[in-house]
Amino acid sequence: PSYMIVAGLVFTTLSVPFLRSEFGEEWDCEAPVEIVHRVMRQRAEFKGEELVVLTQVLANDLTVGYEDLENVLLLSINGSGVRNLRHVMEIIDGCDSEYLRFSFLTNLVLVLKTADIKKATAEALEQHNIPAAHSADLAGDSNGSKEVAGSPATAAVAPEAEPALRRARGALARGQAS
C-alpha cells in the first residue's frame, strides 16, 4: 500500500483493504464512525482524490505525546486541503513556513517545526528499522528525483523491502518495537 512517514507520522490512503487490515472483516462496525461514514458515503469530487489517514505515530522526540494517535483523517496541512497522499508530499516538500500544521477530522491540530522534520524522519526510520520514508509508487516524478519530507530520493521502498516494512508495522502495533 502507499504510505509516507514524516517525523514518525505514518500516513496512508484510506481504503477498504486498509480498513480490513486494521479492524477485521467487520471494519464497518469496528472502525471509527467518521471514517466509516466517509468511506461509505463520500464520493471523489475529482480524479485522483483520496482520503489520507494518519494510521499511527512512531515514537520520536518530535512527536512525544502523540504516540496514541491512530486512524484519524488528515484534512489539511497549513490550511491547504489534502487531495491525496502525493499532494501531502508536495505540500510538505514545498513548505517554506516555520511550522507544519496538520489538521485532522477530529478537530486535532498537530504542529511540527519544519526545520526539525528531516532529522526526525531519518531517526524514526532508523529507530524502527523501516527502510524508506515512502512507498515506491510515491518515489517521484518521471525522472525519479522527487524528495519526500526531507528524505533522499533513493529512499523509495524496493518491492523486496515491503515485507520488512509490514513486519515492522506489525511489531509496532503489537507493542514489540522500542
Image (spheres, rainbow, N blue to C red):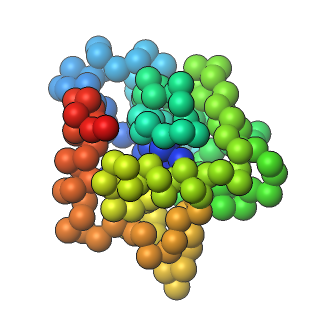
Query: Foreground residue, 123 or 17?
Result: 123
How many tags in the picture?
A: 0
In the rendered structure, the answer to whether residue 67 lies left or right of residue 84 reads left
The quarter of the displayed image where residue 174 is located: top left
Residue drawn 69% across and 35% down? 111
Residue drawn 49% across and 40% down? 60
**Residue located farthest toward the bottom when viewing the structure as drawn:** 143
Residue drawn 44% across and 58% down? 133
**Residue located farthest toward the right when viewing the structure as drawn:** 97
Residue 3 visible, this orientation: no
Residue drawn 31% across and 38% down? 178
Q: Report x, y in % for residue 10.
A: 44, 43
Q: Is residue 7 above or below residue 32?
A: below
In the rendered structure, the answer to whether residue 177 lies left or right of residue 108 reads left
In the rendered structure, the answer to whether residue 97 lies left or right of residue 131 reads right
Query: Foreground residue, 66 or 70?
Result: 66
Residue 97 visible, this orientation: yes
Q: Report x, y in % for residue 141.
A: 54, 76
Query: Foreground residue, 10 or 39?
Result: 10
Q: Is residue 72 above or below residue 140?
A: above
Query: Foreground residue, 83 or 145?
Result: 145
Q: Is residue 65 above or below residue 168?
A: above
